[in-house]
Structure formats: C-alpha cells, structure tokens
Amino acid sequence: MGDIPSSPAIRRLFDAFPAMDRIDISVTYADIRRTTYCETARRATDEKYILTVSDGGSKAGIECSRGKSAWYALCELARRVGDGTLRDGEFIRSPAFASRGYIEGFYGKPWTSRQRVDILRLAAFHGMNTVYYAPKDDPYHREKWRDLYPADALADLAALVREASEHYMDFYWCAAPGLSIRYSDDGDFEALMRKTRQLYSIGVRCFGLLLDDIEPELSDAADQARYGETVNAHIDLVCRYSDALAALDETLRLTVCPTLYHGRGDEYYIAKLGRNIPARVSLFWTGRDICSRELTEFEALKFIESTRHKPLYWDNYPVNDMAMYNEMHLGPLIGRGPELWKYAEGLICNCMEYAECSKIPLITAAEYLWNGAAYEPEEAWRRAIREIVGRESAAVFSVFADHLRTSCLMDENSKQLIGLFFDVAKQWKKGEKEAALESAAEYIEKMRACREFLARDLPLCRELAKWTEKFGVFCELADKLLESFTSGGDARIRELHALLAKYDSNPTRFADDADIRIAVREIIGS
C-alpha cells in the first residue's frame, strides 16, 4: 500500500472493505495535465484521478495530484470491491460540478452528532465535497445567533469540523440572523463577528449567511431611515461581512442565501443583490420554485445574466419538512439538467430530518453531481437501496420504497405495482385467470416479506414507522382483494370497505400517484 495517504478516514475504508487489503495498491502523485485537467469541463481540479486495475483485480494503480483525489480513487475502488464490479481497465475520473454536497437545513429536530458523522462519511465516500451546517431549529444558528456556543455544543461542532477535514469536505457553518438583526446597528454586526471568530477558532474556514424565510420589508426605524429598502441593507451586510472575513483570513469563503431565493432569476431584489456583492461570494438559489421540479441550463443562464453570479443550487430535495411532513422522499434525484454543471457553481441537497432515509436519495444525487451526462436515476436508486439495506434485503425493501417517490420532482410513484396491475389485467382479459391470481399472489408474498423487514429494530425502519403503518393497511387490503377474487362474499366486501376507510384515514402519503383508492373501489364497487 505504498504512498497511500494515512488518515482515520482511509483506515476506516480498509476496515469496511477488508478485501482491499488483498489488492496491491500503488499511488503516484504528479501535478501535471493528465492528473489535474478535466478535458470535458475545461478546468483544472485537484479532484481528478486515474484508476488502473490489472491482473484480474489484484493490482490497482492510482495517478492523482493530491491526497484528496487519492481519497476519491480509493473510494471508487472500495465501491467496486463492495458491489462486485471490480474489473481490469483504466478509469479516468473528474467531477462535473465543482461544489457537490448537502445541507442540514430543514425545519424539525436537528440530527444527533452520530447522525451528522454518518451522513458526512457517506457523502464523502460517494464523492461529495461540501457540507453546510444550518439546522433551522439549532437555536445558536437562528434564534440565538448573537450568543456564543456553550462549551459542550462547541466541542461537538469541533469534532464534526475535524471529520469534514479528514474526509476532504468543506464545512460551512451558517448564521441566520435575519429574524432579529438590526442592519444599521454596529453592535449587532460585532455580535456576528464574535460568533464567527468563535467558529473560526475550532477550524471553520467556510461560512454561510442565510437571509431566507424572513419578512421582506425592514421593520426597524433606523434601518428604514438608513437603507430605504431591504435589498440595500442586505448588500451592505454581505459586503461588510465578506470584507471582515477577508480581514480575518483571506482564504475564508462565504455563501449567502438571499431573501428571494427562487423565481425566474431576473427579479429586482436578486438582480440588484447579485450585481452589488463581491464576485467571490457564492449565491444560493432554489430554481423556479422553492421545491423545483426541474433545474435547467437555460434558467441558470438567466440567473447568471441577471446577477453576474453562477447559481449555487440549494436543492430542496429530499427535504420533507413543513407542508411535506406526511411525505417520505425515497426516490432518486431527477429533473436536473445533464449539463447544468456548466452554468452552476454547484448543487447542495437539503436533507430530511430523517437521516437514515436521506441516505438513499443522497447517494443518487452524488452520482448525478459527479457525472450528470451518464447518470441513470433508476440504476442509481437500485444501487443506493442495496448499499443502505444490504444486497439480501434490497429487492424486498424496494417493494415498499416504490410507493414513496411522491415529491416535488413529480416522480412516477408505485411503478412496480402499476406494472403488476397492467399484467394482471391483461391476463384476466385473456381468460388466464389462474395466471393472473398467481401474479397477484407473488406480489403479495413480497409485501409480506417487506413487512417483516420493516419490523426490524433498525434506525431506517424506526424512521419509517408512520409510513410502515399505512403500508400494513395496504397489505391487508391486498390480501382481502385476493380473497374476494377466489371466494367472494358480501362479508369480505364489507371488510374491504372498512380497510379502505382505514387506509384513507391515515394522512401519510403512500402510493397516491398509483390511484390505489380508485383501483380498489373499482374492484369492490363503491
């Protein structure tokens, strides 16, 4: 294992994939075009690597420029070992998006320290390079933004910052002062800087200033007199903060989330803000909507033209807070342009309160961010499920996950079930009633196996509890439907009506896009 970087992250990688110890791995570092220049993106990067596997997978050579790119190469090698796809060949890799990551930016119970570490390690393993810390319900991020973190909370953050550094992740700590800041008050600005210096002391080198989800008009009389309108106050705050960060350490980076963070991109507020803040400041944008079905190259170009900044997409998927709290977003990332990387600074996924469930869509997003042109959502989704629940349980769990793709992305829900409906209906119409009933019975057996998996005492299963409850009613409906076909009877019809009422009374969204209710009512009669 000559020249392999030594770090806790890499030691854990070899512990997790012990078969890697049997591979003769060599790493060669060179700061040359072959190892630093992305031919497709036409830019230099410290994340490119060339992985060469030979001798039936017993040897692996890595050419790269930095420890960071060596890490990405080793992670690909580990993934290939883990999923059985290791084969001889030369694999040249460089990421499409420059900034690839996630944000803990939801409303709801913040993640635990353990969950934060798990998500960070997973994201890094799949080639993400950025994490934003901005949980809305961390009081020291939002309500108590003026107050310094107490010692124990600061120690937890310091440990997370170290994890990020070990995994080559840029860690952004974000302040959200907009609910109460007085822009014209020097004391408030000093409070922001005092908090910033505290985070700088534990190794934070990237900062976020979030001005989202606040009143659009200035409420303080002194602010009104000085600035006239909100955008002027925000320009002044961003410029002062950017300058202060540069004075503290010229390498520090800043991202801003504006108050108007979605739309066409040429609205007065965002155009004026973008044109009057430093080019070095990154600017968050969610697209046409808060939760955008699509993010397109054309829309990104409009944003650049108006603001003179490339958008840094705050992608509100898979987050399921606020009005979406009854949805569980387990589907793959879709609807993002294959060449969006050309016109965007990056894309940051806003995760769910449910950390374990967030892992599945997050893995698919990581694949898209590395190579959007080759991204196949369904294949990425199947791989993500296999990784999170295990190869032996993946097919079973997918029966359940298939019903939880409803989101702003307008994904097709319950694809497996819809396919079954078509097959059974076709067999029934052809008079192949026995075959139709066998097909339905096979699916019901899969549902039963899925219920057994979901009953396990696992973090993922615990997070899915309220959706599992509705799935249970759905399974009972399927059983009774099959019974009604084979033996009929008014009593079973009454049972089906009762189960359907129970299903409808549960507010969680499950299989809605497949019109389950309509299908059942058509079968049993309204």
Image (cartoon, helix red, strand yellow):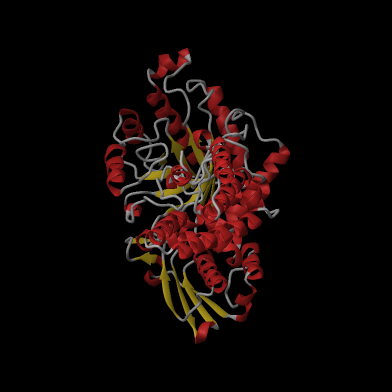
Q: Is residue 164 visible?
A: no
- Quarter holding residue 13: bottom right
Residue 117 in the image: above or below residue 6: above
- Residue 378, x across and y down, in percent: 43, 60
- Residue 447: quarter of image: bottom right
Count of marks placed on residues: 0
The quarter holding residue 465 reads top right
Which residue does the image show at 60% across and 63% down from the upper left? 393
> Please, which residue is most extreme toward the bottom here?
55
Please tell me which residue lies in front, 306 or 84. Answer: 84
Residue 10's spot in the image, x, y percent? 61, 66
The reply to whether residue 498 is in sight is yes
97 left or right of 200 in image: left
Q: Position of residue 299 (x, y in %)?
A: 29, 43
The residue at the point 46 percent across, 38 percent down is 526
Q: Can you say whether 216 is above or below 524 in the image?
A: above
- Residue 468: percent from left, percent from top: 61, 47
At x 67%, y 50%, the residue is 114
Q: Which quarter of the rendering shows the N terminus?
A: bottom right
- Up-down relation of residue 419 to residue 296 (above or below): below
Looking at this view, is 321 or 365 the one in front?
321
